[in-house]
Amino acid sequence: MNKINCLEMEEQKIIGCSPKFLEALEVAKRVALSNANIFITGETGTGKEVFAKYIHNESKHQKGPFVAINCSAIPENLLESELFGHAKGSFTGAQDKRVGLFEEAQDGTLFLDEIGDLGLTLQAKILRVLQEKKIRRIGENQPRIINCRIISATNRDI
């Protein structure tokens, strides 16, 4: 048992000392120091969000917000508005403008849980955000620059 790693895990509210767990924690610690977007896979209940929070807390984005959303819990037509935001009047029921989660996570981390459940159209839009670091609210024409790390997770075999 590596005592130093176990103490670090307790500070982050993570408990575990098996060799595989410590190996996964080391990988998480290394990627936290990079600017890369992260993709986590694993079965339901294995702690994907716990690792995402650990990566956030160990990264340069730690002073920004950690914003999490379960992509499978929201219907896809509403999820696009949740992620990107929308302009007032852009669709029925859009009585006010709304800032999306990409903007809410500015200077922090956006955790997209169960991203494998999304349809290909929305996955393509998210891929575009990863490439361009820009979003457009629904009903607006001007792009908005975003600065957040994106951590995605799924339990599916992609």
Image (spheres, helix red, strand yellow):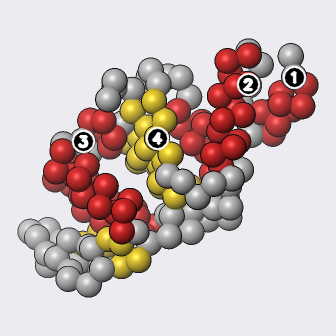
So how many labels did they put on this image? 4
Return the x and y of residue 97 as percentages of the image width and height: 27, 78
Is 137 placed left or right of 46 in the picture? left
Question: Which class describes the residues within 10 Å of circle 3: few (<14), some (14-19), or many (20+)?
Answer: some
Residue type, mark 4 in image: Phe
Mark toward the start of the polypeptide (3 vs 2): 2
Q: Quadrant of residue 100?
A: bottom left
Q: Which mark is residue 118?
A: 3
Between marks 1 and 4, how big is the CA–CA gap? Answer: 26 Å
Residue tagged by mark 2?
22
Residue tagged by mark 1?
2
Q: What secondary structure is found at the residue carrying circle 1?
A: loop
Question: Which class describes the residues within 10 Å of circle 2: few (<14), some (14-19), or many (20+)?
Answer: some
Q: Residue placed farthest to the left in the image?
A: 92
Relative to 128, say whether 121 is above or below.
above
Q: Which mark is residue 39?
A: 4
Q: Quadrant of residue 47?
A: top right
Q: What secondary structure is found at the residue carrying circle 2?
A: helix
Residue type, mark 2 in image: Leu
Q: Residue at x 31, y 55 (%)?
A: 127
Badge nearest the viewer, 3 or 2: 2
Between marks 2 and 4, how big is the CA–CA gap? Answer: 19 Å
Mark toward the start of the polypeptide (4 vs 3): 4
Q: Residue at x 65, y 28 (%)?
A: 24
Q: Quadrant of the C terminus?
A: top left
Q: Disc 3, disc 1: CB below 8 Å?
A: no
Q: Residue at x 11, y 70 (%)?
A: 91
Mark toward the start of the polypeptide (2 vs 4): 2
Is 119 placed left or right of 131 in the picture? left
Between marks 3 and 2, how big is the CA–CA gap? Answer: 31 Å
Is 43 placed left or right of 10 in the picture? left
Mark toward the start of the polypeptide (1 vs 4): 1
